[in-house]
Each structure stands twice: as structure tokens, then as C-alpha cells.
Image (cartoon, rainbow, N blue to C red):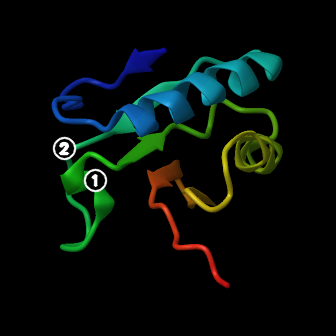
Amino acid sequence: MRFKKDVDPGGIRPEVLLALMAAERIWAQQGAEVVVTSMLDGRHAPTSLHYSGQAVDIRRWNLRDPAGAVQALREALPANQYDVILEKDHIHVEWQPKRPTS
């Protein structure tokens, strides 16, 4: 795993680190390295989970199959706790537990 210059990991939630560990395994299957491009740094929407340490952005252009990696990461993480979104220039992963519906 590598961090883009100026990425600020201070205050990141342990749940996000678990997602990055899963991403490392999945990226390795595509012969790629996880490159973190944003954590608590950068410019995001005012309500972004980046600012509370609950989100991370990962480089996607080094993957042969970004959509496949996103699907594999979604399957590796509890669906009721994580969102994995394929963006135009990165993969956004956030830990946002949902309340169970009864």
C-alpha cells in the first residue's frame, strides 16, 4: 500500500483500515498496488465522511478491471456498513453503518 503525497491519515477510523486491507488482497489479484489518494485531506462535499475519518479514496487507473475490483470489495465487506463507489477518477470507500430495517 502506498499513499499519494500529502495524504493525511491522522484520525482515520479502524474500520476504514480494515477496508484497505481487503482492498490490498483484491488489488493484488489484478497485479496492482493500493494507492490511497485521499483520506482526511483534500476538498470534499461539506458533509463528506472524509472529514470524520470514515472515508478513503483509492486510485483506480492502475487496475485492469476497476468495476470488478469494486464488486469484489463490496462482497468482501459487510453491505450494511460500507459503501464502495466507482467514481470517474477513483474508488471511494466509506464506512457508514446502516440501521437494520425491521
Residue at image mark 2: 41
- Identified at 60% across, 40% down, the residue is 60
- Identified at 21% across, 44% down, the residue is 40
Q: Would residue 47 appear left or right of 37 to someone viewing this image?
A: left
Count of picture labels = 2
Q: Would residue 98 appear left or right of 4 to someone viewing this image?
A: right
Residue at image mark 1: 50
User: Vertical placement of 56 versus 24: above or below?
Assistant: below
What is the x, y in percent for residue 70?
72, 48
- Identified at 83% across, 45% down, the residue is 68
Rendering quarter of residue 24: top right
- Identified at 49% across, 38% down, the residue is 58
Mark 1 vs 2: CB contact within 8 A? yes
Q: Would residue 2 appear left or right of 52 to someone viewing this image?
A: right
What is the x, y in percent for residue 93?
51, 50
* 1 or 2: tag closer to the N-terminus: 2
Identity, as a three-letter code, of the amino acid under mark 1: His
Rendering quarter of residue 56: top left
